[in-house]
Amino acid sequence: MATAAWQQARPPIKTVPMPAPSAAQTISIGDALAQVRANLRANPALALHQAQMVREAVPQLAEAHRLEARALIALGRGDEARQAELAAISASIHDSELMEAGAALAANDLPRAEPILRNRLKAVPHDVAAIRMLAEIAGRLGRYRDAENLLRRAVELAPAFHAARSNLATVLHRQNRTEEALAELDVLMAQDADNPTHFNLKAAALGRIGEYEEATALYRAVLDQVPEQPKVWMSQGHVLKTLGQRDESIAAYREAIRIAPHLGEAWWSLANMKTVRFTDADLAAMEGALGEARLSIEDRFHLEFALGKAEEDRIADDPRRAEKAFGHYLRANATRRQLLDHDPDEIHQQVARHKALFTRGFIESRAGQGHDAPDPIFILGMPRAGSTLIEQILSSHSIVEGTMELPDIPALAARVGREGGGYPRALADLDADAIAAIGRDYIARTRVQRKSEKPLFIDKLPNNWVHTGFIHLILPNAKIIDARRHPLDCCFSNFKQHFARGQSFSYDLADMGRYYADYVDLMAHFDAVMPGRVIRVIHEEMVEDQETVTRRLLDALGLPFEEACLRFWENDRAVRTASSEQVRRPINRDGVDQWKRFDPWLGELRAALGDVLDAYPAAPSR
């Protein structure tokens, strides 16, 4: 079989002498490979000899290495088989098809790359390099299950293919299956102990489940071995910031910038401390980096966000800086928005589906169902609405543990949708046992995030507002807090913020206003169909009278008052949100009415908010 898959780099040798059962013969490379395949099962020793002869004649022919590996596996020579498979992967770089697919991937031209790779795998099902590349496409499209299946196949065929195993750990990590990711990373580190990349990946995974001390120790091990790694310094800075080690975090970000002055994310990480004020030299350095023609799009929007913060910090000295700051924010958001696929109508329709399903009758008919655990306290609402402050106050209580923004409710909702033909409609078809099982699954999934014996814990993923009905259904004894902030302050605070992932609504003022209005609409619906179920905390009221609002909140949660909740900034717990530095200080009015300096440019936002803005803090009457 002489297909394009075997004509790698058009080798000058077209024929090869091959041993046959009777006598040697000279045949074409395609026929030689066909003979190897034919002999793999019946006579693997002969197949091995034949594959080696083809490989010696055409060293860059990846299929010859692959067939040699399969013959070695059949003969029980696993170590040699692994080396042969790795040699096949190395030879693949000379393959014209994979080179074309690789060029398409580098250009992010996935529609061109995918059919090349699928056709390749039809012809060569065991080509692990092609399998890994196809998995990369699935990962970029967010099809993590598909990527996982492909990568598992790759490491099954080539257990020593470290890049594929590393990708598998990353894909598992992105599915919030961190313990499985850590298991793959342990295999990887056992196979390839001197590679600092694996330490870096493991540190990131450990940080995801709150093992920050171990994570920072691994980052230090990497940096001791290979110190000129700006992104590792930046990751170390993230962990140190989470741990409240402010000066060490700033130093790590500064080291990343020293090594890579154009690394926009490192500049933004400094800006995202919220309490760091850039110097004039910093401003000049960022503007200089922004002027580089070959700057990547990611570096560009990160720099624009950071420059917006630097200019905003100077408005008090020169009000004319407001227009310049807004210009940076506008360009940052527009650039980031180009990379995202956000449809505001989708959120609006999702809200409509939840309102249609979660009627008073539906909720009352399922009373007494769900898992009875009282452990979770959900804090939800808009990002940048004061949820971290509420979490810090509550986690200062002796029986409440703060965790992080947990991904488990959206993951469980997605699973319900996949298995039942659409979410939330599929919830109507679940019986009491199934509903309770989902609640138990949530408690089990989040166990890894709980580091103490405290009976209550906080899940503060803001976007859970759209799952309020789902949460009530599966965990009827959980508490739900809606953290709400003035629409203009909240939305503009989001507009100034770059989120590592998610929050795709936040990069356009009109999208943001619509999202806020949809959120208020759905929460008003739940106020009507299950009165008193959701506890609302208005941010401005908390700022004006912390003690009164805190006492009221604790009472609503059924918790006794504790003085430590009023001195929340003394709590040394790890905080992993943009507000981590702000909640390590007493409450202040720094974040109140910041939108007013930018009011001339907020017309689109006002229009999208509509009567939600006028009715705040109440919801508009419908």
Image (cartoon, helix red, strand yellow):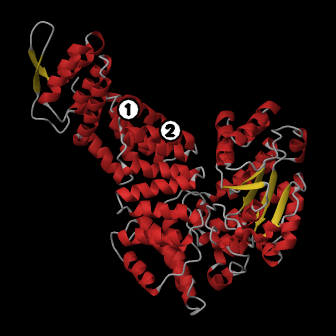
**Residue in the foreground of this view, choosing between 9 and 319:** 319
Residue 277, placed above or below residue 558: below
Residue 328, how many percent across, how many down?
51, 78
Q: Can residue 610 be seen in this view?
A: yes
Residue 444, how many percent across, how many down?
69, 39
Q: Is residue 327 visible?
A: no
Residue 371, placed above or below residue 311: above
On the picture, is 269 further left or further right than 2?
Answer: right
On the picture, is 316 further left or further right than 17?
Answer: right
* Residue in the picture at 49% in, 44% down: 171
Q: Nearer the viewer, mark 2 or mark 1?
A: 2
**Residue in the foreground of this view, choosing between 604 and 331:** 331
Write down the quadrant of residue 86 in the picture. Answer: top left
* Residue in the picture at 84% in, 60% down: 535
* Residue in the picture at 34% in, 29% down: 126
For mark 2, give the secondary structure. Answer: helix
Write down the quadrant of residue 397 in the picture. Answer: bottom right
- Picture disc at residue 133: none
Q: Given the current orientation, which residue lies at the most extreme bottom position?
A: 318
For mark 1, give the secondary structure. Answer: loop
Residue 83, placed above or below residue 23: below
Residue 509, how many percent across, how many down?
62, 70
Pointers 2 and 1 in contact (C-beta within 8 Å): no
On the picture, is 446 further left or further right than 95?
Answer: right
Mark 2 sits on what residue? 183
Residue 523, placed above or below residue 253: above
Would you call the spot at circle 1 few (<14 residues within 10 Å), some (14-19), or many (20 or more)? many
**Quadrant (top left, top right, bottom left, bottom right) of the C terminus:** bottom right
Mark 1 sits on what residue? 159
Residue 60, how many percent across, how many down?
18, 36
Whichever of callouts 2 and 1 sits on the residue coming sooner in the sequence is 1
